[in-house]
Image (spheres, grey):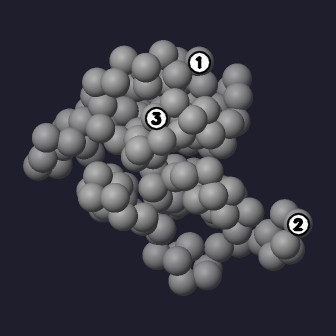
Amino acid sequence: MIRVLVADDHHIVRQGLRHILDREPGMCFAGEAASASEVMARVRERNWDVLVLDIGLPDRSGMEVLKEIKEIYPEAPVVILSMHTERQYVRQALSEGASGYVAKEGAAEEVVEAIRMAVEGEVYLSPSLAAGGEKGGGGEGG
């Protein structure tokens, strides 16, 4: 059973993911967090296998949280779930050690696939991102 911790500042997103995960064979919802401080508290409990993390948290950037988690638990699978599809966000997340990047505009199945791949040590990108269909952010400095 893959235990999934969900961190997003929007209650409806957390509840939606809970609904999806609880109906997915071999997966379960292990907990939730609405802020960076909550994420770090839950991460330290280690009662999860994969973290699904939003970039836009109210008290700190999800990218900063990702970096901190990877310093503490380098092997921890973290899948970014974000509305940001710009190249610089995807690049930064992957360089900080994310196991995947899922666009919120994508299908629910994408999150499930990203979680499964993360557990296997593989990297998942939403098809629109992997195909180079991300919006904006074309410069090297971004």
Q: Position of residue 60 (x, y in %)?
A: 70, 28
What amino acid is labelled 1 in the image?
Answer: Ser
Looking at the image, is mark 1 or mark 3 nearer the viewer?
Answer: 3
| Mark before the other along the chain sequence, 3 or 2 | 3
Is disc 3 surrounded by few (<14), some (14 to 19) or many (20+) residues within 10 Å?
Answer: few
The residue that label 2 is drawn on is 141
Label 3 with label 2: CB-CB less than 8 Å? no
Instruction: Give me the disc on residue 73.
Output: 3
| Mark before the other along the chain sequence, 1 or 3 | 1
Q: Compared to 54, does 112 lie above or below?
A: below
| Mark before the other along the chain sequence, 1 or 2 | 1
Viewer can see residue 56 = no
Q: Position of residue 71 (x, y in %)?
A: 57, 35
Residue sitting at x 88%, y 66%: 141
The residue that label 1 is drawn on is 37
What amino acid is labelled 2 in the image?
Answer: Gly
Left or right of residue 136, residue 112 in this image: left
Viewer can see residue 14 = yes
Residue sitting at x 43%, y 20%: 44
Quarter assignment of residue 136: bottom right
